[in-house]
Image: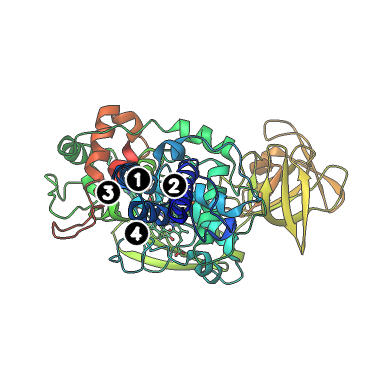
Amino acid sequence: MKNTLVRIASLIIMVVSFIAFVAKAPAFPIPSENLLPWSVWFMISLLVNVIVWFPVMKLVSFALGVIWFYAFIAGLVPDTSTASGTVTTLDWTDPDAVAEIGLAIFNGKGQCAACHTLDTSAPKGRCPDLTDIGINAANRVPGTDAKTYLIESLYDPGKYLVTGYGKIMPEVWKNPIALTKLEIEAVIAFLQSQGGEIDPNPFDEPIDRAKAETTAEALPPLLSGDPEAGKKVFIEAACISCHEVTGLENPKAGEGNEDFEVVTAPELSEIAAFNELRYIEESILKPHAQIVSGYGTVKVNAKGITYEGTLVSQDNEKIVIRTKAADSTEEEHTILLSDIDDEPIEDLTNLIENGYSTLTLTPTGSDASVSGEIVEETEDTVTLKVGDENQTLSKTDVKKQMTLTDFDGEQTVGEHVSGTIDDDEIVIIVDGGEESFDPFDIEEAIIAFAYGKRLLVKSPMPDNFPILLTVVDMADLLAYLSTLTGETATEETAPTDIAEEVTE
Ligand code: HEC
Ligand code: HEC
């Protein structure tokens, strides 16, 4: 009698725990602690059943055990269908469940597991192990808390690089990984759960998805090309005139090129080891977008002298420019930013893009000019840092200035009233009083809406490759460049895999 009770009780527990396990019910009896998940209840009752029942029921129990075993194994394998399915809501009343979704994305759609391990005993690869990242994140950047650091790591991984690691991590919110905001929230919860405390507070994305979409569209999709053909393109399109690659010979070495001036350029033998394919593609299609430091060219006027050359370095106070004389002798010049001359600006659109850093203008209706560093601009306004505060000024309600230079080089600047160099008279207001000039005495008259210091850094790399190269050439070229990892065959981790993943 007692035996029968035990048998029936354990049978019931076994069946119930099996169903609860399959239905993914929260652990029993303490749901949040994951203390005794249903799989543990199931195993205990299975054991009891196999011991206490007569042979036929032993077999039935065993069969159920086998089914459970497969279900359990399947549960351990990341479920890519839920990972790639879109997350539509997150239930923050249960942060652990959110972290669970984050884990699925980590292993699935996010492709994080392709690079990152969660096991300190794993061999140190090209990407940091993320064990205890929930707590380590708080100590990476002074003054940045864990969550802010994690947000930055995912949206702008290149901004702060973990010491010893290269710029390989993709911006996971962009194509091809393209995590949504909710997915990133879940991933962050998961990362915080690794040794830290999950912070369920909402955050604003530090990016503008709408804007990124338009720029992403501007780049053609990555196609898979033929690396061997790409090597030929690299030689024929004369990339090799400027860029060295170990083991690749320039058939026209020392010959120069009629289409462009050959300049010193970065060595590309390891370009794919530390850069995403998207970056490499952008380097070719839009060379001015991101310029490798130390290679950009600039033209500045300082104290009346024009310097044109390579921008060697730059800080908050000065720049160093290397110029090359006609006889090829090189010279370095250190120029204080405060010595850079104010240039007249005839067109106030895209000031920042055109390299202006400061601005002086006189708003209509005011007699005094306003000067400051350019903080921000829109189509119609510009915000200047004047002293300690920001002032937003209209770009259209601005007094027109005129700079007159006579034949002795003498300059007069004033508010323009009337006349140009082609008229009989030019009238400008100087020091509050109108003055009239005879255009006959004037060598140059420049009208400007503002004055500003300009430091426009450009890439010396030709920007006409998008026109010169066909889509197929471009795909082949990228396929070739993605093989340039500086790797020897003995090394384990093959970054070419990463490049190919990005291609897909
Ligand atoms: C192609 C490889 C790659 C992929 C894919 C990748 N990462 Fe990374 N990740 C890196 C590298 C390399 C670093 C170190 C350099 C840096 O800080 O950017 C890094 C850094 C990090 C850091 C900072 C680590 C620290 O110790 O401070 C976090 C957090 C992180 N990744 C999370 C993720 C998550 C989450 C995903 C998936 C959504 C992901 N990564 C996908 C390569 C990758
Ligand atoms: C006139 C010389 C010149 C030619 C020709 C040229 N480049 Fe460049 N390239 C440069 C210079 C200088 C830089 C560094 C400045 C910059 O970032 O734009 C550069 C940067 C790059 C970078 C980024 C390197 C890095 O370390 O981040 C890549 C990739 C690149 N070039 C590929 C190519 C390819 C492919 C071609 C042929 C289709 C080519 N270049 C032709 C001069 C040249």
Q: Under tag 4, what secondary structure? A: loop
Check the image and name the residue furthest to the front: 1
What's the amino acid at mark 2? Leu
Q: Quadrant of residue 323?
A: bottom left
Query: Mark 3 CB in 8 Å range of ligand 2?
Result: yes
For this view, does 45 lie left or right of residue 402?
left
User: Which amino acid does the dot numbered 4 rest on?
Assistant: Ala
Residue at the disc numbered 1: 61
Q: Could you classify mark 1 by the number of other residues whose Cα lies within 10 Å: few (under 14), some (14-19), or many (20 or more)?
A: many
Residue 325 circle label: 4
- Label 4 neighbourhood size at 10 Å, few (<14), some (14-19), many (20+)? few
Q: Which mark is residue 262?
A: 3
Disc 2 or 1, which lies upstream in sequence? 2
Give me the residue at 57% from left, 53% from top.
Answer: 454
Q: Are marks 2 and 1 in contact (CB under 8 Å)?
A: yes
Q: How many marks?
A: 4
Judging depth in this view, the residue of 408 and 152 nearest the camera is 152
Q: Earlier in the sequence, mark 2 or mark 4?
A: 2
Instruction: Judge whether residue 456 can be spotted in this image.
Output: no
In the picture, the disc for residue 11 is: 2
Q: Which element carries disc 2, helix, strand or loop?
A: helix
**First along the sequence among labels 4 and 3:** 3
How far from the left and from the top, in percent, is residue 71?
A: 37, 43
Of pointers 1 and 3, the one earlier in the residue sequence: 1
**Residue 461 vertical placement versus 334 (above, below):** above
Q: Counting other residues with Cα less than 10 Å from the Cα at mark 2, is it few (<14), some (14-19), or many (20 or more)?
A: many
Contact flag, marks 3 and 2 (Cβ < 8 Å): no
Vertical comparison of 332 with 237: above or below: below
Residue 501 horizontal side relative to residue 32, left or right: left
Residue 161: name its quadrant.
bottom left
Hey, what amino acid is under mark 1? Ser
Secondary structure beneath dot 1 equals helix
